[in-house]
Every structure is written in C-alpha cells, then in structure tokens.
Image (spheres, rainbow, N blue to C red):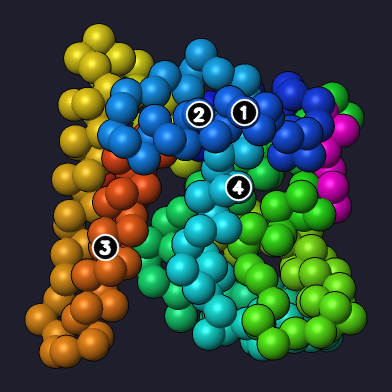
Amino acid sequence: MLSLLYQEGPSTEGIFRRSGSAKTCKELKEKLDSGAEVDLACESIFVTASLFKDFLRNIPGSILSSQLCDKWVSVMDQGNNEEKIKSIQRLIEQLPRANVVLLRYIFGVLHGIEMRSEENQMNAFNLAICIAPSLLWPPVSSTPDMESEFTKKISSLVQFLTENCCRIFGEEINSLFGEILMTCKRENGSGNLEHTSKCSTMFEKWGVRKKGGEEERKEGRKKEIWRRFHLKYRICVPTCVFSEY
C-alpha cells in the first residue's frame, strides 16, 4: 500500500485530498476484513490513499500516541527550528518501535509527494491539512473550539515534520522504499499470500517480552494490531529496517 502511494502519489494531483469512491472503499475494506486477496495496484490510487487514512484513524490511541498528546501540541511553541527538531526527536523516542517504523515510511511518502508539489498541487501545508487528523486526534472531552485549535496545531506539526523529515528521521528516508520495490518485484511471481506471510514473520520478531499482567497484554495487543495490518493492508517493511530499532 505505501509502496503504491510512494510510486504513484507524487504524480497524482490532489493525492490524499481527493477521496476515493466510498462504495469501492467499503467493498475493499470488507474484502480485506474477510481475509480475501486484494490487488490494490488495480484500484484507483485515491482509493488506496483513503484506505490508508482509514487504517491510521483506527489505530488505538493514534500512531503519535494520545498519551503524548499535550507534548505534541506544545512542540510548535518551541523557539527555533533546531529546538523543535530536538523536541520532536525526543518524543519519537518515546513511541513504540512499530509506530516509529511506520512513521518513517509515512513521511517518506509525504516527502516524495511534497518534492513534486508543483505537479501534484500538494505541498507540505496541503498534505498536513489532509493527513494530520489521521495521525493524532483531540481528547474526547474537547469542546468544538478546543478541537479547532488542536487541529491547527497538529496540522502545523505535520507540515513541519514533512518539511524537515530528513533531519528528523535521517537522510536515509529518501531510500527507504528502494528495498520494498525490489522485494515486491522479486516476489510478484510467487503470489501475494507468500509475500504477506514474510511480512508477518518480520513483525513476529518484535514478539512479546517477558512482562507481567496488563503490560504484557498491551504488548500482545500492539503486536496483533500490526500483524493484522500486514495481513489486511498488504504493507511490506523490509527486514533490514528492524536492525535499526
């Protein structure tokens, strides 16, 4: 899914802004939920983008972690850009490894799209408006005014992350998808199921550490969420990525 967005997104006007067919999205989601094989390459890229945003919105606690909500909101109130970057990097270090891996790929996609914004009409500001609500959402108790202010701050944060992703995540973010594309090409002939199985095996490496009670159950739940993501949404993260975490 992310490899498709990485390949087709930069040349697609309005990517992440234009929605895919609601009917098609619903049908594909039902197929994915049932475990059926789905070839997203045959679908509109707008459908793929819509499905991906839907997945992000359904991550419990959000990919940026609701527990760090106040800290994320305050990041853009920091002094200069250097201080903002350091604050963001400290917050990223507090996220689960799975979240960090996926964030790097997300911003790898957004960076690639933003670099060709003259062609696709989606600069960092426009991308942030469209995707920020899927990365972190306000507390349930928020008033409409609080939600509006929250959305503005998170959009500003996502814009900053997109514009400075190479400094925040490292220059290698520009080459993250190289191995994915090579792996997918090699495995196309062997079928999607084998490819998905290999992806799932990589996520098994995270495992559930020897922890007690509630903490162990939480780890197990996170592991299951990411395992299901691979099975349902067909995202491939190469094995080499895990050596970094």
Name the residue type under label 1.
Answer: Lys
Q: Callout 3: helix, strand or loop?
A: helix
Would residue 125 be counted in the magenta stretch? yes
Q: Are marks 2 and 1 in contact (CB under 8 Å)?
A: yes
At a point 39% along the width and 30% down the height, the residue shown is: 31
Q: Residues within 10 Å of mark 2 (few under 14, many from 20)?
A: few
Asked whether, in this view, residue 79 is left or right of residue 208, the answer is: right
Name the residue type under label 4.
Answer: Lys
Q: Are marks 2 and 3 in contact (CB under 8 Å)?
A: no
Distance between mark 4 and mark 3 Cα atoms = 20 Å
Q: Is residue 177 visible?
A: no
Distance between mark 1 and mark 3 Cα atoms = 30 Å
Name the residue type under label 2.
Answer: Glu
Q: Callout 4: helix, strand or loop?
A: helix
92 and 151: which is toward the camera: 151
> To which residue does mark 4 refer?
53
Asked whether, in this view, residue 164 is left or right of residue 37, the answer is: right
Quarter of the image where one finds residue 142: bottom right
Distance between mark 4 and mark 2 Cα atoms = 16 Å
> To which residue does mark 3 refer?
223
